[in-house]
Amino acid sequence: DGGITQSPKYLFRKEGQNVTLSCEQNLNHDAMYWYRQDPGQGLRLIYYSQIVNDFQKGDIAEGYSVSREKKESFPLTVTSAQKNPTAFYLCASSRGHQPQHFGDGTRLSIL
Amino acid sequence: DAKTTQPTSMDCAEGRAANLPCNHSTISGNEYVYWYRQIHSQGPQYIIHGLKNNETNEMASLIITEDRKSSTLILPHATLRDTAVYYCIVSRLNTGTASKLTFGTGTRLQVTL
């Protein structure tokens, strides 16, 4: 079945380390998105990409980086510059103005 | 994008209709109303969206007032599996390929026996 796959489901990082979260979609969607969710809060947009090799900052891009080398893939790197990286990270994709489809998320924790 | 206001929480008895309200008094003419829900520790699930006409699909109905300043999501026969946080989002129809969504804190719906 078509969908969005995020891996791993749980991720642990030591302070000072960069870590990359994977997001793959086989829906043939042009646009992809990364959101962050903190406990009891809504989702906040980190980065989004409308086409391959192009991406824009969202509302909370500091301390994060992305790449979009393939249509199917939009990995997110949480750098050591992100002061409070512990959160639930969600990836989504869409085509045009159609609704966004979400993956099941990666929960990142700092050891 | 216009801001939305939703109640923090609601309860509904299983088998009854759940009516979730949303205010979006600053909505502009080219903005759609979207509803998503999020079950604990999962990604949000799209439910329904509309511009000005009422909409219905296999999951729910969306009623938008004539002035478009508020809307109601209706789950006609709520089950325990409908317990989730429900987000009402207003978003502009983009001419490009990406549509940015702004999530608030939503309404936590608890369906009870």
Image (cartoon, coloured by chain):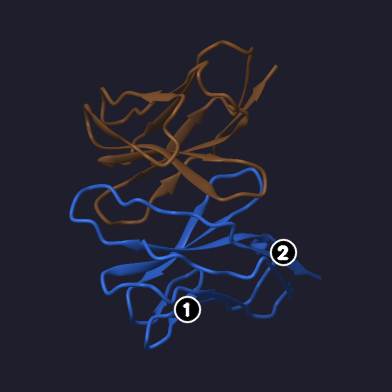
Chain colours: A brown, B blue
Q: Give the crowd class for mark 1: few <14, some 14-19, many >=20 residues within 10 Å.
A: many
Whether residue A1 can be seen here: no
| Residue pointed to by mark 2 | B80
Taking the spot 31% from the left edge, 30% from the top edge, the residue there is A72
A36 on left or right of B64: right
| Residue pointed to by mark 1 | B71
Query: In the image, is residue A29 above or below residue B54?
Result: above
Q: Residue furthest left?
A: B95
Q: SS of the residue at dot 1?
A: strand
Taking the spot 26% from the left edge, 69% from the top edge, the residue there is B30
Q: SS of the residue at dot 2?
A: helix
Mark 2 and mark 1, same subunit?
yes
Kindly identify which chain the residue marked by label 1 belongs to: B
Q: Disc 2 marks which amino acid?
A: Leu
Where is the N terminus of chain A found, in terms of image quarters?
Answer: top left
A46 on left or right of B110: left
Kindly identify which chain the residue marked by label 2 belongs to: B
Whether residue A52 can be seen here: yes
Which quarter of the figure has residue A98?
bottom left
